[in-house]
Image (cartoon, rainbow, N blue to C red):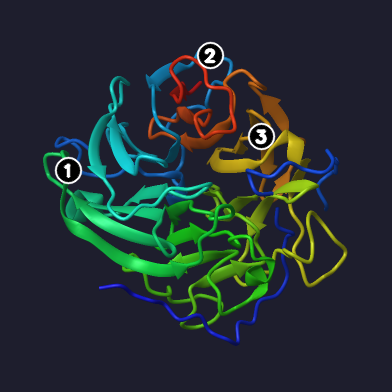
């Protein structure tokens, strides 16, 4: 049964970062700014970055030649790992979820999610395996339907080939649009399900405590408002976001997120419960104490940040328009100077994820209508651990 979670009117949310750019928008200027101060044999999910578990090997070696894990994918978006190092990948346009072996090779379809209506930036977006996948076999998905964006879950068969029964609706009523649908989901170290949403091209929604749009949501695995949220009974964890497509936790269990800017600045934010990240009042940092400032900003021409991952003391950010992966050194919640990797080499980068063995997987997004399609696109590439 669908759980339509009510959002409290009296949401008391305080300081925040400014929110950031829709991936389909052309910025007015390239401003710059310094940041203000599974198959049958698989019975468990990987200890994902969302569990804030230590990386089992050295950091990803981005200087090594990558291994092609899968090719000819149709706008790969969500990516989630299983304990054996294999992965599920979601295709935005086809609504298909495919299984990629740990050693790479042909990606085998396991399911076509019903009810997905792709269009613009919408479609089948984020996916995440349950922390208890070994026993419950739940796979979660965020997608664009006929009337809204929604989160569902379904049970993967024991043989890893298909699912049992119909998807269970967990959270519905997230407004949809051609742009700013958000869509990243991940389980946190607390076992709760986090979801990044967009403002669906209606700016005031980001500040409206009655709307789930322009927020980071924190839900129970059943899709209800998680206990301990800033406002009891509300799913909202933070607000003032424009379009969140990246979520990751560091080794201290702190949440980070990427943010699309409008015309000036994209952001990386360190997310705290109850804080307001400023959109649409602010893009980038400000001196307004009501809003939290971002840890990193870029010109929108250099980034359009989607997926995010953290390994050790390094944050990895996938850049669509920037056609690169950004690496950001981190000490606690302080960040150093970002460095661009692979600029233009692989085209648009949608997702970055750290695998159970410490390798970094990246997905290209050149078939999304905004990139130059290359031989084998779209692809999943693996950079080994050091």
Which badge, 3 or 1, is on the more N-terminal residue? 1
Judged from the image, the secondary structure of the residue bearing numbered disc 2 is loop
At horizontal 63% and vertical 43% (from top left) the residue drawn is 24
Q: Quadrant of residue 231?
A: bottom right
Asked whether 42 or 201 is in front, the reply is 201
Q: Residues within 10 Å of mark 1 (few under 14, many from 20)?
A: some
Q: Residues within 10 Å of mark 2 (few under 14, many from 20)?
A: few
Task: Using the numbered discs, state the Cα–Cα distance from disc 2 to disc 1 in whole angstroms.
Answer: 35 Å
- Asked whether disc 3 touches disc 1, contact meaning CB atoms under 8 Å apart, the reply is no
Judged from the image, the secondary structure of the residue bearing numbered disc 3 is loop
> Residue 281: horizontal and vertical position, in percent?
78, 66
> Residue 366: horizontal and vertical position, in percent?
53, 28
Question: Which dot marks residue 59?
Answer: none
In this view, 122 is above or below 100 = below
Choose mark 2 or mark 1, whichever is in front: 1
In this view, 253 is above or below 172 = above
Location of mark 1 (residue) = 162
- Asked whether disc 2 touches disc 1, contact meaning CB atoms under 8 Å apart, the reply is no
> Residue 114: horizontal and vertical position, in percent?
27, 52
Judged from the image, the secondary structure of the residue bearing numbered disc 1 is loop
Q: Residues within 10 Å of mark 3 (few under 14, many from 20)?
A: many
Location of mark 2 (residue) = 64
Q: Quadrant of residue 318?
A: top right
At horizontal 65% and vertical 55% (from top left) the residue drawn is 270
Location of mark 3 (residue) = 321
Q: Is residue 82 visible?
A: no
> Residue 42: horizontal and vertical position, in percent?
20, 38
- Quarter of the picture containing the N terminus is bottom left
Residue 20 placement, left or right of 37: left
Task: Using the numbered discs, state the Cα–Cα distance from disc 3 to disc 1 in whole angstroms.
Answer: 35 Å
Task: Using the numbered discs, state the Cα–Cα distance from disc 2 to disc 3 in whole angstroms.
Answer: 24 Å
In this view, 319 is above or below 198 = above
């Amino acid at each position: 049964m669908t759980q339509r979670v009510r959002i409290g009117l009296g949401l008391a949310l305080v300081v925040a970062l400014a929110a950031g750019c829709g991936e389909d928008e052309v910025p007015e200027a390239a401003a710059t700014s310094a940041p203000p101060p599974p198959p049958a044999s698989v019975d468990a999910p990987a200890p994902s970055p969302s569990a804030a578990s230590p990386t089992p090997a050295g950091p990803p070696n981005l200087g090594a030649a990558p291994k092609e894990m899968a090719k000819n994918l149709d706008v790969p978006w969500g990516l989630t790992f299983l304990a054996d190092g294999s992965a599920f990948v979601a295709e935005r346009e086809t609504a298909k979820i495919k299984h990629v072996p740990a050693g790479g090779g042909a990606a085998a379809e396991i399911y076509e999610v019903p009810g997905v209506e792709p269009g613009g930036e919408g479609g089948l977006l984020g996916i995440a395996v349950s922390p208890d996948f070994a026993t419950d076999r739940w796979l979660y998905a965020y997608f664009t339907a006929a009337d809204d964006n929604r989160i569902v879950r379904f049970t993967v068969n024991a043989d890893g080939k298909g699912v049992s029964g119909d998807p269970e609706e967990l959270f519905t009523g997230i407004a949809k649009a051609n742009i700013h649908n958000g869509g990243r989901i991940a389980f946190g170290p607390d076992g709760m399900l986090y979801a990044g949403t967009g403002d669906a091209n209606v700016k005031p929604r980001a500040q409206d405590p009655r709307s789930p749009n322009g927020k980071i949501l924190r839900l129970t695995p059943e899709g209800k408002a998680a206990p301990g949220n800033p406002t009891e009974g509300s799913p909202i964890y933070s607000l003032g976001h424009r379009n969140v497509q990246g979520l990751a936790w560091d080794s201290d269990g702190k949440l980070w997120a990427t943010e699309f800017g409008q015309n000036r600045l994209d952001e990386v934010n360190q997310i705290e419960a109850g804080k307001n990240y400023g959109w649409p009042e602010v893009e980038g940092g400000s001196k307004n104490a009501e809003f939290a400032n971002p840890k990193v900003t870029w010109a929108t021409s250099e980034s359009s940040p989607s997926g995010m991952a953290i390994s050790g003391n390094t944050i990895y950010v996938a850049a669509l328009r920037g056609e690169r992966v950004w690496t950001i050194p981190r000490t606690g919640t302080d960040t150093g100077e970002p460095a661009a990797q692979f600029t233009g080499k692989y085209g648009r980068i949608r997702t970055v994820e750290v695998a159970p063995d410490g390798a970094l997987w990246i997905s290209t997004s050149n078939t999304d209508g905004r990139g130059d399609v290359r031989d084998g696109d779209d692809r999943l590439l693996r950079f080994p651990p050091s």
